[in-house]
Image (cartoon, rainbow, N blue to C red):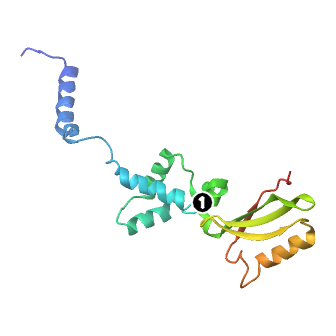
């Protein structure tokens, strides 16, 4: 009997044959899980940005209601790819832009401007206080005076916040410029 191959060579051939038999890599189209559709990924990002208090599980539930079934891990991966923090961190880092966008319906702004009026004494300065509803851009005149003292401001505040007829009824937040008038 003649030996044409070493025992290690024969064992290596055997291992390759067994490995080839159980290797199904050529049958796979691509490695790993299929990617989430771009439309669904955009929906996840939108839900997270518009609902800053929602965690991964709440987003998964909302997606399931819409017919999209993702795991909370997949939602987390999508949000990380888009640099969106988890819900507790998102709620701690609210920017003014996000705050105003979320509260437009209950947000009003107020400020003064001055008007120079010609009278028989010459130019007279009048102070005008106005309120603006940010969502509708509706402007309401709060009052006009030559001397905006504390009593006048208190009366304007009472008029603005009257329970039934005040023009700030239904608003939760009032923004004003804290700089003194020049």
Q: Quadrant of residue 106?
A: bottom right
- Position of residue 73 relative to residue 20, above or below, is below
Q: Residue at x 49, y 65 (%)?
A: 58
Residue found at x 45% / y 50%: 78
Q: Residue at x 73, y 79 (%)?
A: 166
> Judging from the image, what secondary structure is the residue with disc 1 in?
helix
Considering every residue shown, the one lying at the far bottom of the view is: 164
Q: Nearer the viewer, residue 31 or 128?
A: 128
Q: Residue 32: where, in percent of width, then height?
A: 32, 44
Q: Between residue 80 and residue 131, name the one nearer to us.
A: 131
When asked about the image quadrant of residue 160, the answer is: bottom right
* Residue at horizontal 92 percent and vertical 67 percent from the top: 149
Q: Is 131 situated left or right of 126 in this image?
A: left
Q: Quick check: can you spot residue 7?
A: yes
| Left-right relation of 50 to 163 | left
Horizontal and vertical percent for residue 70?
A: 39, 58
Q: Nearer the viewer, residue 7 or 51?
A: 51
175 lies above or below 172? above
Q: Is residue 94 visible?
A: no
- The residue identified by callout 1 is 101
Total numbered labels? 1
Within-10-Å neighbours for mark 1: few <14, some 14–19, many 20+: some
Residue furthest to the left in view is 1
Residue 27's spot in the image, x, y percent? 19, 41
- Image location of residue 119, percent across then percent down: 88, 62
- Taking 23 as reference, is 69 above or below it? below
The reply, left or right, for residue 87 in relation to residue 108 is left
Viewer-proximal residue among 111 and 73:
111
Quadrant of image for the N terminus: top left
């Amino acid at each position: 009997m003649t030996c044409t191959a070493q025992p290690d060579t024969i064992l290596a051939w055997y291992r390759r044959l067994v490995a080839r038999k159980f290797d199904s890599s050529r049958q796979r189209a691509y490695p790993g899980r299929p990617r989430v559709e771009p439309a669904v990924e955009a929906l996840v990002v939108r839900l997270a940005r518009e609902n800053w208090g929602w965690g991964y599980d709440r987003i998964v539930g909302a997606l399931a209601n819409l017919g999209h079934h993702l795991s909370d891990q997949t939602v987390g991966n999508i949000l990380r790819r888009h640099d969106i923090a988890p819900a507790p961190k998102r709620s701690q880092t609210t920017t003014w832009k996000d705050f105003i966008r979320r509260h437009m319906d209950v947000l009003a702004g107020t400020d003064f401007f001055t008007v120079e009026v010609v009278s028989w004494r010459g130019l007279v300065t009048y102070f005008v206080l106005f309120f603006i509803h940010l969502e509708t851009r509706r402007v309401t005149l709060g009052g006009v005076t030559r001397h905006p003292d504390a009593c006048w401001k208190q009366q304007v505040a009472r008029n603005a916040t009257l329970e039934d007829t005040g023009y700030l009824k239904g608003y939760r937040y009032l923004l004003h410029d804290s700089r003194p008038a020049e």
